[in-house]
Image (spheres, helix red, strand yellow):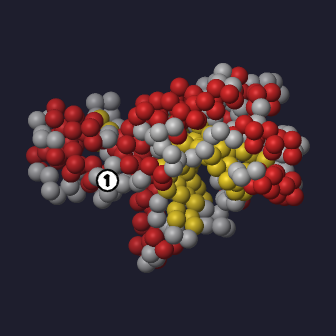
């Protein structure tokens, strides 16, 4: 497909795409405008999908001209657009610096989930994740994070307009957002928080907190800050019930061990009795899928209001792991359910286009040289 151009941003221009209303009001205030203008501009960008200031017809021409001079609406370009046989759609999005990230939309009846990225690559090194194998380049800005939602909403809207489909009924509209794409969101929390506030803002996307989920490998200080500043639904990439195994699978565990992580999870839901932490557990054949591991997991989570997502491992070249046998996954789930643990086996979606959990891989320069060392057969 022909690569779509991005909207350029000069060093003198401010990108309004990633401004929440508080930041927008401050910016417009510096231009001598009243606070209500921030409501108008925010609605134009995120509800009307404006990609230029010319279409903002309830704003004076003079202000539109000043906005065009001082700011821009920078959006990513589409470098790739792939569809799975199951309806999952994956975009490869080119950023202004030439890096590429991936964003995935998963349609279901009466529900549509957008999985977005927070970093170019990932600064962590979880051993079973394709993104981690690629290394890391940089954090995404709030504009680049929310730009994924803006663009997906535009592209899905085009499709509905073309087919005449009812977005709500077909799952072709975005009802849920998960920060489960490339990167560790809590290592980019300043920018992520701005994007989260836009997702929740009734003048922007108007999503409820329970429909926005942030997934973390366990950055404990970030979990506490998220709880204090913007407590959306929390998912924790656990994958092992003890420190010895988790140290191997999720090296971040060496800094924030399992007991420390569980304490943070309990704090996160302490003042929200109806909230549960979702624990993600990739099922790795012969590694973490035995009845013993299931019983350890029960003991670990018994004091944490929780839901467990068992994720059949999605292979990628050079992974070094394979997926647990279906009967072993079923047995693992049965042990957890009998102990009263809310447990589901996540349905694999989009694996034929490498859009499933753990398979996302953009195109970028690895500043950590992790990918180079792996290709040479060394250790990261």
Q: Residue at x 55, y 43 (%)?
A: 234
* Residue nearest the observer in this picture, 70 or 123: 123
Q: Which one is nearer the viewer's eye here, 121 or 34?
A: 34
Question: Is 169 rendered above or below residue 275?
Answer: below
| Mark 1, residue position | 202
Locate the N terminus and report the quarter of the image it occupies: bottom right
Q: From this viewpoint, which residue is outermost toward the top?
A: 255
Residue 97 shows up from this direction: no
Q: Position of residue 241 (x, y in %)?
A: 76, 36
Q: How many marks?
A: 1
Does dot 1 land on a helix, a strand or a loop? loop
Q: Give the residue drawn at x 46%, y 76%.
A: 165
| Residue found at x 33% / y 34% | 10
| Residue 181 position in % (x across, y down) | 58, 45
Q: Position of residue 243 (x, y in %)?
A: 76, 28
Q: Say few, some or many: other residues with alpha carbon within 10 Å of mark 1 (under 14 / 14 to 19 / 20 or more).
A: some
- Is residue 255 depicted above or below 75 in this figure? above
User: On the picture, is 73 further left or further right than 257?
Assistant: left
In this image, 325 relative to 39: left or right?
right
Whether residue 292 is visible: yes
- Residue 81: quadrant of the picture: bottom right
Picture quarter containing residue 180?
top right
């Amino acid at each position: 497909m022909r690569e779509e151009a991005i909207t350029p941003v000069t060093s003198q221009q401010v990108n309004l795409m990633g401004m929440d209303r508080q930041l927008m009001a401050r910016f417009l205030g510096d231009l001598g405008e009243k606070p209500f203008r921030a409501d108008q501009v925010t609605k134009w960008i995120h509800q009307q999908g404006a990609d230029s200031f010319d279409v903002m017809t309830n704003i004076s021409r003079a202000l539109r001209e000043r906005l065009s001079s001082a700011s821009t609406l920078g959006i990513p370009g589409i470098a790739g657009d792939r569809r799975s046989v199951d309806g999952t759609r994956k975009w490869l999005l080119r950023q202004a610096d030439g890096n590429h990230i991936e964003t995935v939309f998963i349609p279901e009846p009466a529900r549509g989930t957008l999985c977005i990225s927070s970093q170019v690559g990932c600064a962590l090194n979880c051993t079973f994740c394709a993104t981690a194998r690629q290394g890391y380049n940089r954090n995404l800005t709030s504009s680049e994070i929310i730009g994924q939602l803006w663009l997906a909403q535009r592209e899905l809207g085009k499709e509905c307009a073309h087919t005449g489909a009812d977005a709500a009924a077909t799952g072709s509209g975005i009802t849920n957002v998960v920060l489960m794409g490339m990167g560790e969101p809590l290592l980019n929390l300043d920018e992520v928080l701005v994007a989260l506030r836009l997702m929740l803002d009734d003048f922007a996307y108007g999503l409820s907190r329970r429909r926005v989920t942030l997934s973390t490998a366990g950055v404990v200080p970030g979990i506490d800050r998220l709880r204090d500043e913007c407590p959306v639904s929390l998912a924790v990439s656990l994958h092992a019930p003890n420190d010895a195994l988790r140290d191997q699978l999720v090296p971040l565990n060496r800094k924030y061990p399992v007991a420390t992580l569980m304490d943070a999870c309990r704090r996160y839901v302490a003042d929200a009795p109806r909230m549960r932490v979702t624990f993600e557990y990739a099922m790795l054949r012969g590694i973490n899928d035995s009845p013993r591991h299931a019983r350890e997991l029960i003991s670990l989570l018994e004091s944490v209001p929780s839901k467990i997502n068992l994720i059949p491992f999605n292979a990628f070249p050079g992974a070094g792991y394979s997926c647990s046998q279906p009967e072993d996954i079923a047995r693992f789930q049965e042990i957890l359910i009998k102990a009263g643990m809310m447990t589901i086996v996540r349905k694999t979606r989009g694996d034929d286009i490498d859009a499933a959990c753990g398979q996302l891989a953009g195109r970028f320069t690895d500043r950590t040289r992790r990918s180079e060392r792996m290709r040479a057969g060394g250790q990261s």
